[in-house]
Each structure stands twice: as structure tokens, then as C-alpha cells.
Image: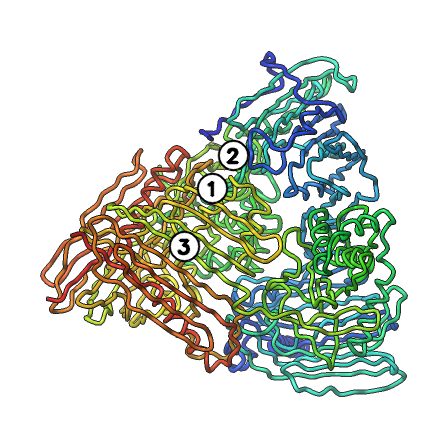
Amino acid sequence: MYLQNTVLIAFFICLSLSLRAQDRARKWGDIPESDLKMTVYAKDSSASSVVLQDVGKLVMTLSGKVSLYRSRRLKVLDERALDKGNLMIPYRDLKYVDDLRDLEVQVTAPDGTRHTVQPDNVFTEKISSRWSARKVFIPDLKKGSVIEYRYELRAGDMLMLNEWYFQEDIPVRWSELEVSVPKYYDYIVLLNTDHPFDLDETSQGIQTNGQYGVTNRWGLADLPAIKDEPYTTSVDDYRSSVKFQLRSILIPDELPKTIISNWEELAKELNDHDYFGIQFRKSAKFEKIWEAFQSEVTPDKDPEVMAGKIFRFVSSNIKWDGTYSIFSDKNLDDAFEKKSGGSGDLNLLLVALMRKSGLKASPLLLSTRSNGKMYPLYPFVTQFNSVVAALRTGDRMIMYDATNPFLPPDQLNDAHYHGDAWVMDVEKPEWLKIMAPEAAQNWYGKMQLSETGEIAGTFQVQTTNNFATNWRTALRGVKPVSFIRKNFATQFSDIQLDSIQFTDAETPEKPLSVKFDCRVPGAASVVNDFIYCQPIVDFVFAESPFKSLTRDFPVEFLTPFRAQYVADLVFPPGYTLEELPAPARVNLPNNGGKMTFNCSKNATGIQVILKMNIAKTSFGPEEYSALRQFYEIVAEKTQVQLALKKT
Amino acid sequence: MRLLSLIVLLCTLLRQMSAQSDYAATGIPAEYFKNAHTVIRSRELTFTVTQPDEAETEERIVMTILNKEGASSASWYEYESEFEKVKSLKGAVYDGEGNLVKESRKQDIQEQESFTDYEFSSSRNKFLKMEYGQYPYTVEFQVRKTIKGFFRVDDFVVQRLGQSVLKSTFSVVAPSGYSFKWKGIRSDVQPVVQESGGTKTTTWKFANLPAVPEEPYHPYFNNEYAMIKIAPVRVSIDGREGDFSDWKQMGAFFYALNKDRDLLSAEMQATVLQMVKDKKTTREKIDAIYRYLEQNHRYVSIQIGIGGWQTLEAGFVEKKKYGDCKALSNYMHAMLKVAGIESWVAIIYAGSNNLPEWYDEAPIPYANHAILYVPGEDLWLECTSNTVPSGYLGDFTSGRKALLLTPQDGKILSTPTQTAADNLKNSHISIGLDEMGIAEVQGDVLYTGDLHEPYRQLIAHKKQADVEKIFVERAEFPIAQLLALKIESSESIPQANLHYSVKINNLVTKSGKRMFVPVSKINPFKRSLPANDKRVLDLKLRDVYAWKDTVDIELPPGYTLENMPSGKHIQSEFGLFDMQAVQQENRIRIIRQVEIQPVSVSAARYNEVRQFYQEMTRADGAQIVLVKT
């Protein structure tokens, strides 16, 4: 069970006493009989393979070279895992010239016979100009075998080799990382795990390579397999890991060399970065778009109105190319000329034009949902992979994201909601919590039921925020009738639509609504003297997406949302309702959301109201069963049926 | 001074005019916008045979991208290997008015990076993306490639679906003695042949082709509509000469290329003989060897040199216990040979979607897979699987032509075509309901053919705990509790059995004293085609299967039947739907039959098929209404 992940920060400089020293890792080739004979992994009987041990030693030399000595041992429990005999070790090939050397692979059968994998099974594939991979195809691999392999990976750059994942998609019995750094290097370390370390020790002294330094060791035992689940951000957010980053170099008699020390320093550095601050601070980088902007747009004194104009100008003139970056690595004008750019180009351009117009705007850096979470205690730019713009006006801050022309102000591209964001403001850098504004979808229907089981009537459907953005994006270039067919009452494939009228389709600041007439032959079933009719023809979902009985990670919704379906149904003459469906009301624990269902009779028929909302975006595994049940109840209500009888 | 500025003005005007005619979207006549995502403004592709085994291609294309559906055409993809090299790739993009926005630089060429652990390959994919943010815009690409050794020339795709063509030229330049066959597909353009100085140039010219709309479920491979296929008659690769004038000769060439690579060690020969020692029939022998292949080998693809067409030696696979489709087929062939059973490797195009057609007039080895054929038993063997029974092909390789490489010559033979009887689902489902409407459901289902494959794969790759988790996640109904689950697949035939027992809270809808029981919620039938009153393309659907389901619904205590579906029977050449409901005391039995036949009809009959599916789907939504007494 995963609770809130804890983030710990440790510094090499401050020494902690060793907590529990434990040597769980065995030497190369020293495989206990019990492992050779193992047929089922006791801690997870569903596993077809298990990492028996994975040991990394990261050694940095005084000259700044880094080597990772890695030694892994896997057990192939049954034939399902024979593909574990295909090894792939990727390494970078371009600038940093990683070097993979001394690769050795050996396989031990359950009876103890051992063979070394010969070089003719080892291939070096040039994947691209940036990446290569060593590939090993272990010959004659049989179930029950233990695979061992080890290698040294040398990085040409001390900033590389900066993370270790203890947990994998198969169970790991023991994973350990040792990091040895010369005394003069000051490293910052970030531990991300909710499993307490089984090995956590620090020592200082002469290291194996003869230099004086600090050695840290972390080890975790018995880690379960970690697998992706729907409705999560990134599975890496939940994998036990350690990351480290060089902070400063303090060689005696030399000036201390600070890589990065705090957010203020980082803000200053970014402010002078060619592909970042310089882009929005130097007018020459965006003079063409500024000229075009001035000739097309009349300035406004109100900062919010002005920012809105800039936002529209950029997002409607330049198309997002689908990539995320915090930088604009050509001039901003290049993106304008190509009418296309990444999130860095588009949103730094917003900052540039806003500042040039005298507004107080800053870049807001963040990490997209699939890119791993952010660490406010960890002042490194590498954790970010995208940027949006923030306007300060009075005591308000309004966010702008030009990656989609259908986004209103203060609403970002879905991928940008990952909990945190950092305001890159040289005077006042700060961290913010960001959450998508509540999205809503409302239905107002007036329907007439006929004796033949046909439903005919008018509907008005309104969407806001994220729902509206999705609709507007999908609506572009599509015929209204095809759009409604795809997005309304999809279970009726023979629905007939007429008089479709969209309101504010091109005004992202406003809700999007559509009104139309519809006719569904055979919507209700007519049997003998009865008509059975389902009055809820459309909703945010008809079936619960939460099918799994249990859950390992939190459910992460993109946005809080609200849905409300109100419909009047007029009965055919001569028919009366047999009974009124009972009202229902359910609340999720911790104010997570609620649903209500209500039917009331009126002179000509019935009014049905179904409402639900999800008020927060994260539901922990312990809340899962309540959430699952809640969705089931809502799904059931969408299927409610009325029985009408001929009188 | 004045004259000079006039000249400057004239030049500017001229440049603008020429720019407009070439690149501005306004230069496209209106009729070419209809149904189009892209418009080829002009294209010239020249394929030059420089040596018997060497060629160069040179291409220049100017294409206007009209909408987001066409945007993928703004990227140009090239494949590079030991045999094919891209000499130059340049691109440019122009806005809607025809103004040059950007010309590509060398560093704009990107690479596709794929990290897979089951293959080694020396080929690379490069691409150049020239997208612009506002439609319409125009891209231009210029590509030069050299090819060393080739069996086939890429089809010249004149027109893709959703593409208009204003002007397009395809030339094959070759020494006068060089001969090739060709065939125009959905094009009757005849080439102009010119000969001079020992060189023969064959040129096809195309002009003014309005777009054919891109509609779903059409019969065309890879959205390619009109094309010219080129089949060289003499080929040469890696110092080997071949005659490809017909399938026979082509087969003989590939046979020779792979000949004598089927030798096993004496030890292995003994093992094979041991395997078949007690087996009486040929089929039993094949099954024993096939089982050995499946259980002890894995698929690993190592592509070096002409490894794309030449198998690794059987001795290699024997030692390593892995190989790709050719190597594993050849190895199986080698083992069968030891057992005295003749077999031939067959090359084939594998895939579940539309296939490239093979034409006798222009024989081209358009293939991506190899399987094995045992003539004595009329049996096909897929040799890359670790799980399927011998003789099973599935929709990946069934119902299409294969080129058999026999010691005599090449032979074309079609793999068996699937019928509804091959792909069955027979189920018996019992539903017990309590007064709250909570259902306890037991199902026994037999699957065969394509329908059984997911179950076979599931248990082959996952153990029970994971199988249960996946079953719950994939079920069409929300499971509240999984009481039992057993999935088994047969060793000898393509069949799987599923048994489950589950609790479902939401199977029925309760409303006051009534309970609504949808009869097919456990195994719904849903099939639909999008509405289209102006369908242009022929309709092609490959699915073929038959379901027979019996559902017994036990009434909850205190409830009686208010209504149940009356019988329904729909039948046409496209399939069958039949549902009957019978009340037997406290139980209602629903018997439903569904049969789906492959469809290959003209556009005029699109709506007929659509309505047929609609009617079936609607009939399947029938429900039982129970009322509390």
C-alpha cells in the first residue's frame, strides 16, 4: 500500500550516523542453492522473474569523471520470462560520450552449471546519433536460470548519471546504490521512497580509489513490482528512487565553484540564459512579432485586458507543435515566422510581449504530468520540462498558456497540471500550488415520448473550462452534426439531429453551449401495454471507469468537475407512470464529491435531475473503494428506467 | 535609375507570380480541394538503374497541406540501411500565399529512436518535419538516395486517399538491355519510352486527379489508391543474380539463397529422432517437433547484411535457441527433414489489416514474414509463436497468397481463408438475482480461432493473480467480487475455455418495485458504421465469427415477469442475429446467435450494411422487466 510519498533531503556534508548496516548483496557468481532451486518467488507468486539483486557503485574522481559499476542478478522463474534473456543497456553517444565497458554476462542453471555468454551474442547498435545500446541475446536460456551481468558505464560529464531507481516492473529482492564522492564535491541528494531504507549509511575516509571522500549507501529490500495504472500522473512518481545533483565544488586554494545553490541563484541564472531570460528580455529576439502585434492590436490600459489581447494574438497566430520545453532555443521570432513552436517558444513569447507592453509578467516553470514530480527543496532546473506565463496584477496572479488557442486565461493545457509550479521572478521566486479550475457540463432537455417509443425534443448542453476546451478543440474543422453524433447520446446510433446551434464556439473565455433538436426512434421499448424509457440519454459517463477491485496508487483526476442533467419528459397521452424512481444522495468522504438524483412529477410528465461533482483531484488508495462505489451508483442512476402503462 | 527600379519591380513581380503559381494555395483550382487533405502540386521521381545492382532515386515534390488530417504529410520519412543511403534530404515550407518561410538545414533532420530488446538492426529511420502553424501551407522536399542491390523498387504511389494530384511524373531510367515489368493500379496511364545512347527512359505522367475521399473500412492497403508497380526482371544483390520474371523463378532464387542452411548437429539429429520415435502418424511427429520448437526457442531478430532475405543457419538456432521468422522456420524445416518430413519455407505479408496485392503480371516479393508449409499434410506452421497449436494461423497470416520456396521452383499458394466456423464463441451463462438486484453470474465460454487467442496469450504471459486482475479490468461489466476464474487453452487445437463466477452489483437497474434486466449486458453485441449518405469507397470488413449464447436468468424471490423480449430473427449475406426468450417456471432462458460474415461490397450498399448492424445492435439491447408482487 502506498501512502503519501515522503521526500527526504540529505547532504553529503552533514554526516549522519549509519542507521543499519547490512550486507545483503552477494558477490559475483556466489549464488545460494536456495536461489538456484527457487521455482516460485515467495513474496509474489505471480512473478515470472525477480531481480535477486541490483548493486550500483557510483564513483566520482577528483577530475570530475563519473563511473557507475553495476551488477545485476535476475532469476527466470518460468518460460514466460525467457525474454529476460534479451538485455539492452542504452548509453548516450553524442556529446557526453558515455563509455560502456567490461560487460560480462553469465548464466547459472538450477543444477549449478554455469556458462559465460560469449561476445558473439553481444551487439552494439547505433540507435541514433545520440544513443547507442549494447544488446545481449543470451543463448540457450532455460527456465530456472539465474542471469548475472555487470559492466562499467563511464560518463564524460559529472552532471550525468544522476538517478537510481530501486523499484522495477518486476519484484526486486535487493537493490543497493553506493555513491563515493571526493570530499570537495558538495552533492545534494533527493530520496523518494515510502519504503524505509534497509541500508542507509555514510562514511568518510580514504576510498577505494585512494582519494579522501564521502561514501553513502542506500539499500531497499523486498520491493514489489510496480505497474502503471490508469488515472495516474507518472508511475515514476511512485517508484522508490534516489537522485543527486552536484551543488558546488570546494577545492582548497581555489575559488569555490557553485553549480547551483538556491532558487534565487537559479532565477538569476535563468534570467541571463540565452534560451530563456534573454529571449524575453532582449527586444531583438522578438522584434518581428512585436511589430506585427502593434500593427494589429490596439493597446489597452487595463492590464488584464491587454494580457488577454496578447494571449489571443500569440495563441491564434502560432500553432503549438506538440512539444514541451522550458526553453526557446531559436529566437522567438523564428517561432513566429514558422507559425509553430514548442511550449517554451509560445509561452516565453507571452512573457516577452507582456513585459514589453509594461505588464508584470513572469515565466512559470513546471513539470508535465508524465515527466515526474517536482521538488521545491531541490533547486535544479532539470526537473522542469515546460513553462507557462503568469501575469501579476494587483494581488492577483493570472496564468496564460498559449499551447491551445481554445484555453481561457487561468486554465492550462492538461499536461501542465502536476500540482506545483515555480515562478521565475528574479525579485521574488516562489512555489505555487496549481489546480485546474472546476470543469462543468450541464444538460437541459425537453423531450416528448411517443407511443411508438420515439423520443423527440430539444437539448441544450453547456460545457465550461476543461470540458469546453476539449469540445472546442474537437469541434474545429468538424461538421456540427458529426460532432454532436460523436459526443451526445452515443448509444443511439440512429439519432437524428437538427437545428444545431453553437454559442460562443470561438470565445474561450465563455462557456460553450450548443442547442439542438433531436429525435431517437426506438429510444424506449414498447412491449404490450408498457413503455419502458430511460430518461437520462447522456452523461459524463455511463459506465464506471474504475473496474479494478484494488488500487496501488492514488487516482489523479485532471480537474475537479461537476455535471448536471435536467430533463423534462412529456408522456404520450393515455399513459401513466407506474411509479416514481426513488431519490438518492451520496457523499464521498473527505468532501471528495457528491451526487444527487431526483425525479418529480408534473402535469404532463416528469422531471429528472442527476447531479454529481468531484471536488478534489487526488484520491488515495484508501479512498479508492468509496470512489469506485460512488461511480457505480452514479452509473446505475444514468440507467434508471421508467415504466409507463396504458390506461 | 528609373529603368533600374522598373526592372527590379518587374523581377519582384515575376518572382511573386512564379512563387504564386508554384506554392500559393490560391493557385489550386477549387475542384481539387474537395475531399482532399493534401494536394500534390508537382512531383518528379526518377529511378535510375546505374549498375545491374545499383540504383539512384531522385525526387522533388511540392505539396500543399490543407488541414490537420494532412499534416502528417509535412514530414518526410526515409529509411537507411547497409543497402540504402540517403545522399541528401532537403525541405522547405511556404505559407498560404506562397512566401518562403523556412528552408531546412542539416540539423533539422531528426531520427526515430527505438529501444527494443528483442532485435538488432543496422537500419535507421530519419525524418524531416516541415510543419507550419496555419493551413493551408505548402511543403517542398528534395531527396536523393542510392540503393545497392535490390529485389524490388518501391511502388510509385500516384495518389493516396484524400489527396489531389495536379502534376506528377515517374521515370525509370535504365540501360537499354535492362528489363522490368510494370502494372498500373487504378491508373490506366501508359508510359512514354525513349531510348538514346544506350539508355532507356520510361515515363508515366499524371495530371489533374481530384481527391478520392479517405473513408474508414476501405479495401486499400496503407491508404494507397492509384499506383505504378515496378517488378525488375533481373535482380542482383550481394553478388547473387536472380531472375524475377515470374513467381517460379523468384521462388527458385530465394530457395537457392537459403539452401544448405538446414544442417543440424549429429546430436540434434538424434534428439529429433528420439522425439518422433514413438509417434505413429506424420502429424503426430510434426506436433512433437513443433512443441519442442515452441517450448525451447524465442523470437529474436538479428538483421545483418542480406539477413532480411537469407536465414541464419539452422546450426545457429540449434545452439542459441533463438531466431527470427526465417531462422525459426528454417530450423523447423531442418528438424522435420531429419524426421523424413518434407517442408517448404513460405514468404508472406503478415498483418490483420488490408494487404498489399500480389500480381502475376508484375511479381514483387512484397512480404514481411516467413512461415513453413508441409505439403504432405497440407499444413501451415507459424514458427515464431511460443503458444499456438500446430497448424494455426489466425487472421495475421490466413486467407492470402504465400510464395512457397520449393527445391523445384517458387509456387504461389493461398493460406486457408477463415470462416465463421473457425472463430466461435459458445457460452452458457447463469444469472441468479437477489431481491436487491445483486447478480451472481456464472459463465462457461468456449472460444476458438481468433477469438481464443487473447485468452491463450493471457495465460501464456501471466500467472493467475495477474490474470484475475486483468480479467476484472477488461470485463464489459463491473465486477464487485470475483469468486472463481479458470482459463485453459488446448495444446492441440485453437481453443480456450473460460469459466468464471462473479458478483455484479449493477447488472440490473432497480426502480421501485421493478427490476430491468438487460439480457446481453454480460456479452453485448455492438457493431456500427459511421453515418455516411455519400459513401464513395467500397466497403471492406474482414471480421468473421459466430457466437452462440445461452443465458439463464433465475428470477429473484418475490418477483414475477412483467415483460420479456419477443423473438427476433435478422439475416442477410452479412450475417445473422437470432434471439429467442423462453420462460421456464422461475427461469428465463435467452438463446442468442450472432454471425458476422466478411463484407466486400460497393459503396452503394454501404447503408445496407450499416442498417443491418444497427438493427442487430438494437435487437441486442432487449431487456426483461420483472415486477415485485
Q: Which amino acid, by three-letter code, is at mark 1?
A: Thr
Q: Which amino acid, by three-letter code, is at mark 2?
A: Tyr
Residue ID for mark 1: A232
Quick one: label 1, few (<14), some, or many (20+) residues within 10 Å? Answer: some
Decide which of B538, A128 is in the foreground and name it: B538
Quick one: label 3, few (<14), some, or many (20+) residues within 10 Å? Answer: some
The relative height of residue B231 versus residue A440 in the rendered view (above or below) is below
Q: Is residue A536 visible?
A: yes
Q: Position of residue B212 (x, y in %)?
A: 54, 78
Q: Position of residue A167 (x, y in %)?
A: 58, 32
- Residue at mark 3 shares a chain with residue at mark 2: yes
What mark, if any, has residue A238 been given in the picture? 2
- Among the two numbered marks 1 and 2 on one chain, the one whose residue lies closer to the N terminus: 1
Quick one: label 2, few (<14), some, or many (20+) residues within 10 Å? Answer: many
Image quadrant holding the N terminus of chain B, namely: bottom right
State how far apart marks 1 and 2 are (Cα).
10 Å
SS for dot 1: loop
Q: Which amino acid, by three-letter code, is at mark 3?
A: Lys
Mark 3 vs mark 2: give the one in front: 2
Decide which of B101, B171 is in the foreground and name it: B171
Q: Is residue B278 left or right of residue A506?
A: right
SS for dot 2: helix
